[in-house]
Image (spheres, rainbow, N blue to C red):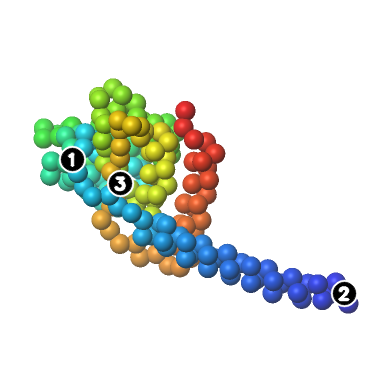
Amino acid sequence: MRVIRRRQLLIPGATAALVLLLFLNGLTGTFLFAHSKVDPLARADAIVVLGGEHDGRETYGLTLAEQGYAPVVLLSNPYRSKDKVMAKACAPRTDIRVICRAPVPSTTRGEAMMTRELADKHGWTTVIVVSWRYHLPRARRIFDQCFTSPTRHVIMRDVPRRYPFSVAQWQYTYLYQYGGWVKAEILGCP
């Protein structure tokens, strides 16, 4: 009889805890990630387009360069070699310099370290970083760890698009971003 009563009490308690966790994840994720801060555009030495889905980010980065925000676009290219979007985006141009490289490791941290390496080589002090809006807070933290210094800074910009995610997709997205943030804090940057 006692075992049955404990189970009857545990199931509603566990359900309530899960509902509370998902509510808090959704609430805090909406404020921290979905409505994250975007920096005003300003002239920079390079535009860094982070890898992700082909959601217009490559075109947006190239368009910013065409508008005079930077003479160089660094496209993170962790995709397969026959990726048509990247083949088009990475094609040589006469008006702007396009650099396409695969980050090592193939993560935001790898992209920040790749940006630092190229900044050291080319003397970049300011870069515009382009990614999903909900990824910007974590990307900003990683670039602060691996790139930013008293003489270097980043301008964080989101891909201009809407995210028609379901509640479940937003829950997953927020949990993923929180997990990535913890990983970034643990790994830091060499």
Residue occupying image coordinates x 18% and y 37%: 70
Q: Which mark is residue 13?
A: none
Amino acid at pointer 1: Arg
For label 3, the SS is strand
Q: Please determine whether, in this image, residue 148 is positioned above or below residue 12.
A: above
Place of residue 118 in the rendered image (x, y in percent of width and height, measured from the top left) = 30, 27
For label 2, the SS is helix
Residue 145, visible in the rendered structure: yes
Left or right, 8 with respect to 155, comes to right
Amino acid at pointer 2: Arg
Is residue 169 or residue 178 the one in the foreground? 178
Q: Residues within 10 Å of mark 3 (few under 14, many from 20)?
A: many
Q: How many marks?
A: 3
Q: Which mark is residue 2?
A: 2
Place of residue 106 in the rendered image (x, y in percent of width and height, measured from the top left) = 43, 36
For label 1, the SS is loop
Residue 83, visible in the rendered structure: no
Amino acid at pointer 3: Met
Which residue has dot 1 on it?
A: 43
Mark 3 or 2, nearer chain start: 2
Which residue has dot 3 on it?
A: 156
Quarter of the image that includes the N terminus:
bottom right
Q: Residues within 10 Å of mark 1 (few under 14, many from 20)?
A: some
Whole-angstrom CA distance, mark 3 to mark 1, is 12 Å
